[in-house]
Image (cartoon, rainbow, N blue to C red):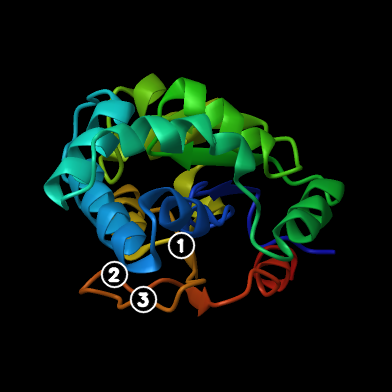
């Protein structure tokens, strides 16, 4: 079987895990959870140099009118995160085909380890914003993962969970597959090589 790519990198908290449901549950409603999560995404992707992730989640809660303590409640429940349907099966097929797999996530080391453990598949490389010293879409987290895998950007594929990652991967020369589970707007981001609501098409995109 011919391969189109030599490694696959993933966003964690949107592309692989259903973090939306957890944020909504902690916030108290879907509307409040979406507002809080949107503010946190805006803040992290606009920050650049790493600032404590948990502090930013707390600040995002305050900005949308939620008690700051909800951030601690969210962190305490990270062990409840679940992969989107089909994710574990798709990643298992890639792993069984011998593909190196990695994660690049805007998260702290502590919460990143918990979240990675919820996917159900092992990864060769896990790069958090804390370890890289910068938040995506700064090129450094992506480049660190590529360096540790020993794979060139053009021979790797990044699976994005939101349009924010499309900006970062374009800057690195890293092709992107958008797992657009929630059907959000492209928001002027660079066009990915593929965009699907389900992760299953990733197998053909990678393995041919």
The residue where tag 3 is placed is: 184
Q: Is residue 149 visible?
A: no
Q: Is residue 108 visible?
A: yes
Tell me where residue 78 sits by quadrant: top right
Quadrant of the image for the N terminus? bottom right
Residue 4 x %, y %: 65, 63
Q: Most extreme residue toward the left, as rendered?
A: 63
Residue occupying image coordinates x 45% and y 32%: 75
Cβ–Cβ below 8 Å for labels 2 and 1? Answer: yes
Tell me where residue 83 sits by quadrant: bottom right
Return the disc, 2 or 1, that comes first in the chain's sequence.
Answer: 1
| Closer to the camera in the image, 180 or 93 | 180
The residue where tag 1 is placed is: 176
Residue 77 x %, y %: 54, 36
Give the alpha-carbon distance from disc 1 to disc 3, as whole Å.
16 Å
Return the disc, 3 or 2, that comes first in the chain's sequence.
Answer: 3
What secondary structure is marked by label 2? loop
Residue 32 x %, y %: 30, 60
| Closer to the camera in the image, 148 or 36 | 36
Q: What is the crowding at mark 3: few (fewer than 14 residues within 10 Å), some, or many (at least 20)?
A: few
Cβ–Cβ below 8 Å for labels 3 and 2? Answer: no
Above or below residue 79? Residue 97 is below
Give the alpha-carbon distance from disc 2 to disc 1, as whole Å.
9 Å
What secondary structure is marked by label 1? strand
What secondary structure is marked by label 3? loop
Observer-side mark, 1 or 3, equals 3
| Closer to the camera in the image, 39 or 148 | 39
The residue where tag 2 is placed is: 190
201 horizontally vs 62: left or right? right
Q: Which mark is residue 130?
A: none
Q: What is the crowding at mark 1: few (fewer than 14 residues within 10 Å), some, or many (at least 20)?
A: many
Quadrant of the image for the C terminus? bottom right
């Amino acid at each position: 079987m011919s391969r189109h790519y030599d490694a696959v990198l993933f966003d964690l908290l949107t592309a692989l895990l259903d973090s939306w449901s957890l944020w909504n549950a902690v916030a108290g409603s879907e509307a409040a959870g979406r507002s809080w999560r949107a503010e946190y995404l805006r803040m992290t992707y606009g920050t650049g140099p790493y600032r404590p992730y948990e502090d930013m989640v707390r600040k995002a809660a305050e900005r949308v009118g939620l008690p700051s303590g909800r951030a601690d409640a969210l962190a305490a429940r990270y062990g409840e995160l679940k992969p989107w349907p089909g994710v574990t099966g798709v990643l298992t097929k890639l792993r069984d085909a011998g593909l190196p797999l990695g994660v690049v996530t805007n998260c702290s080391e502590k919460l990143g380890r918990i979240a990675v453990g919820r996917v159900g598949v092992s990864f060769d490389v896990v790069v958090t914003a804390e370890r890289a010293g910068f938040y995506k879409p700064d090129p450094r987290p992506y480049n660190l993962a590529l360096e540790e895998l020993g794979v060139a950007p053009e021979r790797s594929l990044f699976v994005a969970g939101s349009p924010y990652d499309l900006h970062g991967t374009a800057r690195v020369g890293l092709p992107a597959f958008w797992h657009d589970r929630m059907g959000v707007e492209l928001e002027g981001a660079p066009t990915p090589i593929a965009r699907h609501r389900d992760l299953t098409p990733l197998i053909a995109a990678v393995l041919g």
